């Protein structure tokens, strides 16, 4: 595959997704991801941030009946492909770091084959090469005894260790794109810091672009270069991380930042995003839905 | 705000030399007993009445285990747990029964701690009926009102609620019994920041209004900072830091507390954070 260096790793154009009852999950979402860039997708639960990641990977829930728009991976339109080609292209170019390290690994298989199998089956590597790469990556994520871990079952390992294994597995084939779906939400702060550091190191080494789904503005500030703020499946703001934290354009973004608790401030109340702002945004979205359904839909 | 000195009342809980271990079945020899893993290694502490005490530590530090000993879901190996002067650590279930109403819990995952087949009002009313302190639909609606949910939520099922609303139902169920002590175990770690802030400010207001004694278990020091009056930092089953929140935060004694504090990602750009 030949690709121009200036090409975006990922480009999403006007992506829409709708449930059978007419509820819209994604509303005209557009975003781009350059090679080696980390873009954070933020928003409250239900804002559609995980949906975008799943749409890119082609694993939207089967209940989604209607989706339009296009997704381009390194300039290739996924819509134009036959499903089989699409699956194999996506599998080769991208990987997922899931949220829950407890359920993402198969409990009855050893760790080793769970890392090496995709390398052998999808990337057509030899067993030896896959094994070597797996050991190398496990070492990179600071697992002390990689051989032993490869021979362990998931239940023998702690949550932090399992999450590190999933990161190693995602980075093993040096994919062009990684979707990280709240990879640190289940972990405590010290482990979270280690994991974020790892993702950053590996991502810089391999030049992988990362779509980082999270609701924690603290994490966003540390890991990302660009931020997309979502509300009810709609992009409210899309800006470089510095701009978001120094001078956010949207009130909602400011609300999210203010709601994030910090340990330094003196006793001050918890500040949720103001209810009237949320009500206003909901009215906007509904008005948009009316236009959407009255307008040019067959 | 001024820091009020310790109330003259005796502490609600006095814990002395609390020890607890679990059998380590992974290393059990074929014959003979499994070796034991020490989870709590001789804890000494008081939990003052009418205040919120934060219990922090990394995963595996024993914070949840300690909480479960306080509400006597676990029986310790040694030491005493004085609740209002009586030692509950070795009490049998019959003697504990009348105390149970006073030891309530709010759980981390409301989806698995609320019965999915019961309507909200029944979830709240059932324990009230059990402890003979009400249990009508009206009582449940009153409890809902206290946690800021409209009365018509009484007829909903848990799956019809958002995460924050579910957690409010969990709080309503606990406070409806007017317990003397509530254990809140990681109750906001599954929520997004905005609902987190809502649930926490609700809990803070309720605690002030009703004079609740709460042990709040969390790994998030920023939450503890704003919510709690006292804090206890655990590491591998030992207390490494404790005292009023302000003191511990401005002058942490142990490396554990310092590393927990520095690991919090603050919502500001800081290139040197990873170093």
Image: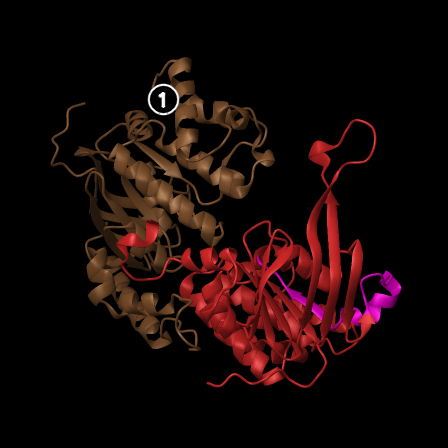
Tag 1: Cα neighbours inside 10 Å, few (<14), some, or many (≥20)?
few
The answer to which of B183 and B21 lies nearer the viewer is: B21
Q: Which chain is red?
A: B
Colour of chain A in the rendered structure image: brown
Q: Is A78 on the left or on the right of B77, as rendered?
A: left
Please report the residue visible at 61 percent of the width from the left and 72 percent of the height from the top. Answer: B172
Please report the residue visible at 64 percent of the width from the left and 75 percent of the height from the top. Answer: B213
The answer to which of A5 and A157 lies nearer the viewer is: A157
Q: Give coordinates of residue B190: x percent, y percent.
A: 50, 57
Q: Which residue is mark 1?
A: A122
Residue A193 higher or lower than B138, as above or below: above
Dot 1: chain letter: A
Q: Is A241 on the left or on the right of B262, as rendered?
A: left
Q: Is residue A289 magenta?
A: no
Q: Give coordinates of residue B155: x percent, y percent.
A: 59, 69
Q: Secondary structure at mark 1?
A: loop
Q: Which residues are magenta?
A: B87-108
Asked whether residue B194 appears in the rendered view, the answer is yes
Determine the image quadrant of residue A254: bottom left
Determine the image quadrant of residue B57: bottom right
Coloration mode: by chain
Please report the residue visible at 75 percent of the width from the left and 65 percent of the height from the top. Answer: B16
Q: Give coordinates of residue B96: x percent, y percent.
A: 83, 66
């Amino acid at each position: 595959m030949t690709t121009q260096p200036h090409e975006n790793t990922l480009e999403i154009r006007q992506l829409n997704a709708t449930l059978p009852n007419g509820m819209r999950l994604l509303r005209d979402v557009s975003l781009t991801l350059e090679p080696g860039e980390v873009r954070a997708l933020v928003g409250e639960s239900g804002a559609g941030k995980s949906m975008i990641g799943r749409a890119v990977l082609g694993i939207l829930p089967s209940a989604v009946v209607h989706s339009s728009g296009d997704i381009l991976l390194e300039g290739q339109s996924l819509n134009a492909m036959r499903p089989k080609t699409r699956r194999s292209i996506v599998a080769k170019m991208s990987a997922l770091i899931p949220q829950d390290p407890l359920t993402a690994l198969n409990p009855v298989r050893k760790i080793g084959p769970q890392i090496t199998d995709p390398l052998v089956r999808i990337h057509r590597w030899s067993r030896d090469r896959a094994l070597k790469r797996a050991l190398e990556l496990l070492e990179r994520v600071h697992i002390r005894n990689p051989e032993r871990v490869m021979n362990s079952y998931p239940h023998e390992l702690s949550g932090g260790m399992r999450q590190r294994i999933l990161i190693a597995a995602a980075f093993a084939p040096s994919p062009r794109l990684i979707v990280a779906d709240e990879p640190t939400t289940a972990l405590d702060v010290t482990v979270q810091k280690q994991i974020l550091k790892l993702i950053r190191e590996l991502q810089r080494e391999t030049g992988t672009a990362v779509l980082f789904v999270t609701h924690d503005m603290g994490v966003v500030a540390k890991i990302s270069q660009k931020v997309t703020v979502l509300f009810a499946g709609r992009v409210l703001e899309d800006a470089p991380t510095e701009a978001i934290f120094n001078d956010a354009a949207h009130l909602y973004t400011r609300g999210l930042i203010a709601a994030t608790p910090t340990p330094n401030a003196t006793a001050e109340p918890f500040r949720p995003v103001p209810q009237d702002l949320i009500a206003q945004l909901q009215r906007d979205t509904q008005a948009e839905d009316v236009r959407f359904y009255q307008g040019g839909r067959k | 705000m001024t820091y009020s000195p310790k109330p003259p009342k005796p502490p609600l809980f006095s814990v002395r030399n609390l020890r607890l271990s679990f059998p380590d079945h992974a290393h059990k020899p074929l014959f003979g007993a499994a070796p034991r893993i020490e989870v709590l290694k001789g804890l000494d502490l008081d939990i003052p009445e009418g205040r919120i005490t934060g219990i922090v530590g990394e995963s595996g530090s024993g914070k949840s285990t300690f909480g479960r000993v306080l509400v006597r879901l676990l029986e310790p190996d040694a030491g005493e747990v004085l609740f209002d002067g009586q030692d509950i650590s070795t009490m049998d279930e019959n003697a504990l029964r009348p105390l149970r109403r006073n030891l309530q819990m709010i759980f981390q995952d409301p989806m698995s701690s609320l019965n999915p087949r019961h309507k909200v009002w029944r979830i709240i009313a059932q324990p009230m009926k059990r402890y003979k302190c009400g249990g009508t639909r009206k009582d449940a609606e009153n409890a809902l009102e206290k946690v800021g949910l409209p009365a018509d939520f009484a007829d909903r099922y848990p799956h019809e609620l958002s995460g924050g609303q579910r957690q409010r139902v969990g709080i309503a169920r606990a406070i409806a019994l007017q317990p003397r002590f509530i254990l809140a175990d990681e109750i906001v770690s599954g929520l997004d920041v905005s609902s987190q802030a809502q649930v926490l400010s609700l809990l803070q207001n309720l605690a002030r209004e009703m004079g609740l004694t709460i042990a709040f278990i969390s790994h998030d020091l920023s939450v503890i900072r704003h919510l709690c009056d006292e804090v206890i930092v655990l590491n591998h089953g030992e207390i490494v830091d404790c005292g009023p929140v302000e003191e511990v935060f401005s002058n942490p004694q142990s490396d554990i507390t310092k590393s927990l504090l520095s690991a919090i990602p603050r919502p500001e750009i800081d290139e040197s954070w990873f170093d």
